[in-house]
Image (spheres, helix red, strand yellow):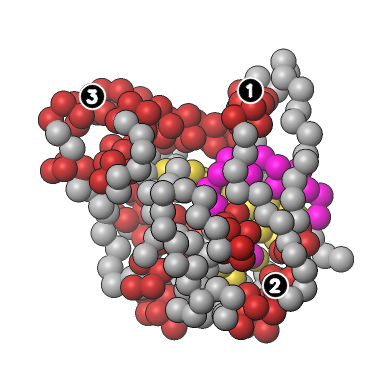
Amino acid sequence: MRKIKLIYIVGTGHSGSTLLDLIIGSSPEVFSVGELYFYSVYRNKEQPDEVQRTFICTCKKAFDECSFWRDINQKGDFKIKLRFSKKEVIKVMLYVLLPFLTPKPVNSFDDTHILLEEIYRKARQVKPELVYILDSSKSFVRLFYLLQIPDIEVYPILLVRDGRGVINSRLRMGQKMGFFSATLQWVLNSLIAKRLIKHNPRAIHISYNLFCQQPGEYIRMLNQKLNIHISEEAFIEDVAKTEYHNIDGNIIKFKGITEIRCDERWKEELSFFKRFMATILLYPFNTLLVKRDSLRK
């Protein structure tokens, strides 16, 4: 059995992962499945958080009526882990930060590899030139365990957006966390993910803010590093023509892409105090993670 090549977008929610997912997924060599760690949630129609899901595939059919996922579901009852315990998260964080002092967490993963094999088999019918499956789950803990599976060849993409934009988006969406909790979570997620991929020769680091300024340059980089073919001039049109079967993600997966524009509503929507505090607290991290990436080191 050949190794499954998996492009994995890692980072924090509200960072533009659905946008990047759709653009990369427009390549004939890439089949995007969206946030695959929600697979069991969609299959069992669960509501694990405050988001009320309707369980609709990007093809606009109900998940259990979508021909793509229905065929895969019939192959078996695949269990995909959505939540990791605080103990598991802390173990991974400590190992990533202090690998010489911390035992490596044991890979007690789920049915991801078997599910990916079925997805690959089915996706080849949609895209005969298929090379990669694309998963935009973003969890660094999930990435840590995926990197331990010998039959999966992971190509991590770290996507980082200005922390002030992420914080504002999370507060605007009414997520149950305060300003300082959202700030700390963005810092930890971004730094751990950055450290996790630091010595990985396949890894790519993309700044959402810089990507929005010059998407053509980043598409050229992705084409070169992954040996795929995303159109530099007509990627928006190609996204509209591509067949997607994504799980979860931003609502733009239904609306499509009409333009690439950096969302900077935080400048108007955050109060002066929160803008000031976020700017001061996040300055060194934004400098390290948002103003520098694989294209602009």
Disc 1 element: helix
**Residue 57's x, y, as percent?**
50, 73
Q: Is residue 142 left or right of residue 189?
A: right
Q: Which residue is mark 3?
A: 277
Give the alpha-carbon distance from disc 3 to disc 1, as whole Å. 28 Å
Q: Is residue 188 left or right of residue 40?
A: left
Q: What residue type is disc 2 on?
A: Asn
Instruction: Classify 10 Å Cα crowding around label 2: few (below 14), some (14-19), many (20 and above).
Output: some
Q: Earlier in the sequence, mark 3 or mark 2?
A: 2
Q: What residue type is disc 1 on?
A: Leu
The N terminus lies in quadrant: bottom right
Q: What residue type is disc 3 on?
A: Met
Q: Do the residues bearing badges 1 and 2 touch, measured as CB atoms within 8 Å? A: no
The C terminus lies in quadrant: top left
Q: Which residue is mark 1?
A: 94
229 shown above or below 160? below
**Residue 40's x, y, as percent?**
63, 59
Q: Residue at x 25, y 46 (%)?
A: 172
Q: Which residue is mark 2?
A: 73
Q: Residue at x 20, y 29 (%)?
A: 274
Residue closest to the eye, 93 or 78: 78
Disc 2 element: helix
178 shown above or below 119? above
Q: Do the residues bearing badges 3 and 1 touch, measured as CB atoms within 8 Å? A: no
Of circles 3 and 2, which is in front? 2
154 shown above or below 106? below
Residue closest to the eye, 244 or 280: 244
The part of the chain drawn in magenta is: 133-151
